[in-house]
Image: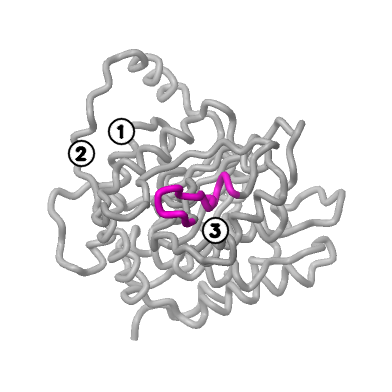
Amino acid sequence: MERNVQALTGGEETSSVPGLGVGNEIPELSLDYPREVASRLRARACEHVLGRDEVIDLVLVAMLSDGHILLEDYPGSGKTTLAKALGESIIDDTPEDEIAAFRRVQFTPDLLPSDITGVMVFDTDTNTFQFRHGPVFAHVLLIDEINRTSPKVQAALLEAMAEKQVTVDNVSHQLDDLFFVIATQNPLDVAGTYPLPLAQIDRFLFKVRMEHIDRASELQVLDTWGSPKEACALPRVERREILQARQLIRGGVAIANVVKEALVDTARNLREDKRVIQGVSTRSLVQAVPALQTLAVFHGRDYVAAEDVEYLLPLILWHRVEFVPGTEDPAGVILAAAEGPLEALARGTLKRG
């Protein structure tokens, strides 16, 4: 667990989430089915983005958990390429709607909420107002530099990310069930930025700090740059397959009471720690359940194990905690809060009865 916390706070890099090999056939509707769906998505993403296997795996966990992910990265690190590769990997089986496979929005200080959600436009032919959909109506939405716009615009995303709908002129418009947000922010450039409000941060399942890719991957990028890009021949995934995979994971993976107790006890320990001003919300614990179930499936299990909790818990909690100014080791606070609950979890019974 310590290595995971170090990785997401800029320390030692962890290994990729295992168990996502690429299959050739779609299995029956069992827990092998979501693994195969994830394998196809992962293969296409890895085709376009080199040296980011762990980040890709976490993005897939978030997508199949019906969560969202915040990437703290450097410019030119491949975040747009990754999000676009995921969007283009999805076959839209509802082509008649106004939902796009992929949309990218660059947040700037002069952006307006209507630039994100959409706006009512007067139609001179019918003498009525018609709703023009904004970029939020997409399967995969990339928000670049989310902290470079005003809190008013950031607040426009709260309803979309939590309830999958937007309200314009007192009329609610539903987003697609697949709606998935990948947001980014620069870890170094703070000029002209607005801190994300806690309510916004709490909507993200994970916040991942990305490091520069390894030397071999960087050399491979240089070797392939400028070469003619051929269309990816790897199989894509239908929208309904992702939604079906989510349902199978929810219903097919057991999560024992001792796992839930470990989550709750860790959260309570954090809230009671004198070094913590604001602890984690109940929402974060609710979001943790499908994420743990998804990771268990990636590991080939039908139950959540202690190793799943140990790997994901820091990623789920660390960005939601507000520490007392001057706290020297925030990662250590999280480790200390989780130590006792994880020990109790390791002694518990996790498998299906």
User: Magenta span covers which residues?
Assistant: 114-128
Question: Mark 2: which amino acid?
Answer: Leu
Which residue is denoted by mark 1 in the rendering? 47
Quarter holding the C terminus is: bottom left
Residues tagged 2 and 3 counted as in contact (Cβ below 8 A): no
Point out the tag, 1 or 2, that comes first from the N-terminus. Answer: 1
- The residue identified by callout 3 is 205
Residue nearest the viewer, comparing 244 with 111: 111
Mark 2 is surrounded, within 10 Å at the Cα level, by few (under 14), some (14 to 19) or many (20 or more) other residues, namely few
258 over 173 or under it: above or below: below
Question: How would you rate the neighbour count of disc 3 (Cα within 10 Å): few for under 14, some for 14-19, many for 20 or more?
Answer: many
Res. 236 in view = yes
Which residue carries the number 2 mark? 234
Q: Is residue 99 left or right of residue 286?
A: left
Give the spatial CA distance, label 1 vs label 3. Answer: 25 Å
- Identity of the residue drawn at 41% across and 22% down: 216
